[in-house]
Image: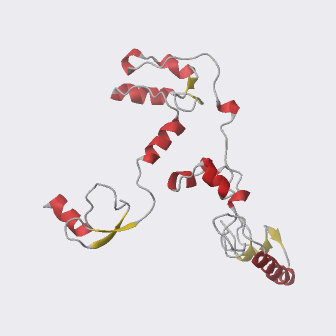
């Protein structure tokens, strides 16, 4: 229980990265008798301890995943922000950690003008520190990346990788399903397109007929 990456193991509690182990608690080896006495006590304590996450009101620790407050990362630094985005205020209401932009990540050195056209740029820009036009954070372009842009005639980016990645994420549909009807046959379906959106949504059968016929 509460184990991860434990292989060929059994009778372990709260362990990670163990191989061929038994009677371990928090990766510490115990005798069988000690293990069988301690684990019920731990579970009983967890059943009496409120869970730390604000979105599990009334829940106790046992049966829930580890509280987000134990994460060494801010909510906005994890993939959770990509799938279930929150504002700083919303995260605070749920007692989630939030990471502020560190001053060390900001670039206050000489400004490098990024050419608008790739054909006017040369590889020496790979030796310079660039400043993201959105966040102000420092970023660089590596030679392989420069050559890729050059080969395809694509302008050099003025935004950091992180800023570009988050922009791409905003193009995804929400990770949520809505009940709708197929706009052709009226079959009840579930879709990531909310009912108020203007796109036509087909069931699989109607979609395939439209595409392949």
**Residue 130 placement: quadrant:** top right
**At x 69% / y 74%, what residue is drawn?**
58
Question: Which quadrant would the C terminus be assigned to in this image?
Answer: bottom left
Identify the image's colour scheme: rainbow, by chain, secondary structure or one colour.
Answer: secondary structure
Q: 172 or 152, which lies in front?
A: 172
Q: Is residue 162 above or below residue 109?
A: below
Q: How many marks?
A: 0
Extreme residue in the left direction: 213
Side of 74 where 120 appears, left or right? left
Return the x and y of residue 112 as percentages of the image width and height: 54, 17
Q: Is residue 36 above or below residue 165?
A: below
**At x 65% / y 69%, what residue is drawn?**
56
Return the x and y of residue 21 as percentages of the image width and height: 74, 73
**At x 27% / y 61%, what residue is drawn?**
201
Side of 125 where 28 appears, left or right? right
Return the x and y of residue 24 as percentages of the image width and height: 79, 73
Side of 193 where 68 appears, left or right? right
Q: Is residue 186 above or below residue 105?
A: below
Q: 140 or 203, which lies in front?
A: 203
Question: Which quadrant would the N terminus be assigned to in this image?
Answer: bottom right
Q: 121 or 10, which lies in front?
A: 121
**At x 81% / y 77%, what residue is drawn?**
45
**Residue 152 placement: quadrant:** top left
């Amino acid at each position: 229980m509460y184990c991860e990456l434990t292989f060929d193991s059994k009778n372990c509690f709260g362990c990670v990265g163990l191989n061929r182990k038994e009677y371990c608690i928090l990766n510490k080896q115990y005798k069988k008798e000690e293990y069988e006495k301690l684990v019920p006590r731990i579970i009983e304590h967890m059943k009496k301890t409120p869970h730390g996450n604000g979105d599990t009101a009334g829940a106790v620790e046992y049966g829930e995943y580890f509280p987000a407050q134990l994460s060494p990362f801010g909510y906005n630094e994890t993939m959770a922000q990509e799938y279930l985005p929150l504002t700083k205020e919303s995260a605070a209401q749920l007692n989630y950690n939030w990471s502020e932009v560190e001053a060390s990540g900001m670039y206050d050195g000489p400004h490098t003008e990024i050419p608008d056209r790739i054909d006017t740029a040369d590889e020496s820009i790979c030796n310079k520190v660039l400043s993201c036009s959105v966040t102000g954070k420092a970023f660089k372009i590596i030679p392989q990346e420069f050559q890729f842009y050059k080969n395809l005639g694509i302008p050099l980016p003025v935004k950091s990788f992180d800023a570009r990645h988050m922009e791409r994420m905003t193009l995804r549909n929400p990770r949520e399903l809505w009940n709708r009807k197929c706009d052709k046959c009226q079959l009840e379906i579930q879709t990531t397109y909310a009912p108020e959106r203007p796109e036509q949504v087909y069931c699989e059968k109607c979609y395939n007929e439209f595409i392949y016929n």
